[in-house]
Amino acid sequence: MKINQITAALLSLGLISAANVAKADTQIVLTSNGQTYNVVYITGSTAARPNVFNAVTNGVFDQTPPTLQPTTASGSTSQYNAIGTIGGVNYIISADFTGSEAGLGALQHFTTDPTILQNPNTASSLPGYSSGTVYLPGTPNPSFINPNNTSQTAAAQADLSMADTSQAVSLTAPPAYTALKNWGIVGVVPFEWVKATNSAPDSSWTDLVNVTDPQLNFALGSVQAASFFTGNANDSDSVYLIGRNKGSGTRVNCMLDTLHGVTSAVNQYCAGNAAYNGSGAITNGSSSVTLKVAGGIVALGNDGFDSGSGVSGTLSMDVNGTTDTYGQIMTIGYLGISDGNTAAGNHATRLTLNGVPENDATVINGTYSFWGHEHLYSTPSPDSTVTTVAEQLVGANANSSPNQSLGSGSTAAGAIESKGGLGGNEVNTSTTQSTIIDPKAMAADKASGDAGYPSQI
């Protein structure tokens, strides 16, 4: 069944929710040309944004590039529409990337409300805070740009979601929640640990060059002295952790890698110039000021940033002059490579993990562990329009079995692999940090849910 044009118009104006409509081949009539377009809504991983954008704009539509809303959309844009034809049929791919866990939760809203809830009860000093338990941003439905009025957004039921881990380890894992359709692994997405810049470094800052998973397990639960990481009893600076909220696949990978536990609480922080945006997301203020000028450090408890840009923005702030009871403070955080590059460009410093630097070579050969499988998921029984877009992205013959999708036997051949800018095949992979690595390049794998450490394949 296709919803009628009146219903579609109400949806596009945000006057009704797609959750109240029998989901089928959603259609919208563009006022610019009067033609009808099939609309497919995609959400999920913020770490995969650049690669999905490259695939959508260079390998999915008949024409390259498709029409974009906004015209300035790029790989760092979370909300955009791509408009054109696929196989001669009019399509709009509408994106709102809110995080892997939030994306899986949004797909679950097809059958039931997900229980991905956040209670930021320790962040009441931030502007925009409202007490009580709330849905994470992007759940139960993401918010998409209205193609007939780009100044408006409206909630709609998601069709597809990128996810940095398997649903098997998600907050909406079966059997408590419906098993989603897994379109296969389209890449391997690495993450890294970074420390914020310090324009007047002391011994604590200088000595902290490496972190280990057991150390981070404790640091996720409470503030630790730098000496806990460095082994130097004189390194007394406190180390505060900057991270993501429960809607994030980056966070899930962090919880798995450190053995902290996906559902375990964390103790995270932000800068004092951050604020809640009215929709439950925390946004940074200016990252060009020092952390002291920004208002120092503020406790978030189990909450965190909705996007890696918040983490990179905080780690871009010079910590010099920011103190607590024990003296000067330090901030470290976990984030994807693209956001890590942003922080490094603002003089933050990458840390080695378990003595190993992050690069394509160490991920490929299994010596670096902080990475996950990048999946594409859909609702359990996608309609023909969703199937068309999914197959354009991953290839009609992509495998849902992780081991079949990694290594030389991979059959994934969709736009994400061919046009997504995947890494791993460079001449010198030891000097390259790709945002997503081609699954065909991998010589190591993890358990299907990313719950294990890499082993050779």
Image (spheres, rainbow, N blue to C red):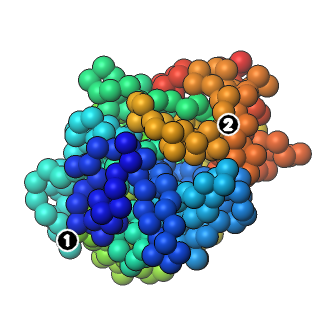
- Residue 210 at least partly seen: no
Q: Residues within 10 Å of mark 1 (few under 14, many from 20)?
A: some
Residue annotated with mark 2: 395
Whether 29 is drawn above or below 2: the answer is below
- The mark that comes first in sequence, 2 or 1, is 1
Q: Is residue 187 left or right of residue 91?
A: right
Based on the displayed image, in which of its 4 quarters is residue 329 positioned?
A: bottom left
Locate residue 407, reporting x and y percent: 74, 26
Based on the displayed image, in which of its 4 quarters is residue 387 positioned?
A: top right
Q: Which amino acid, by three-letter code, is at mark 1?
A: Gly
Q: Residue 128 — which label? A: 1
Based on the displayed image, in which of its 4 quarters is residue 339 positioned?
A: bottom right
Q: Residue at x 69, y 66 (%)?
A: 65
The residue furthest right is 427
Whether 399 is drawn above or below 118: the answer is above
Q: Residue at x 22, y 49 (%)?
A: 20
Q: Which amino acid, by three-letter code, is at mark 2?
A: Gly
Q: Nearer the viewer, residue 113 or 448?
A: 113
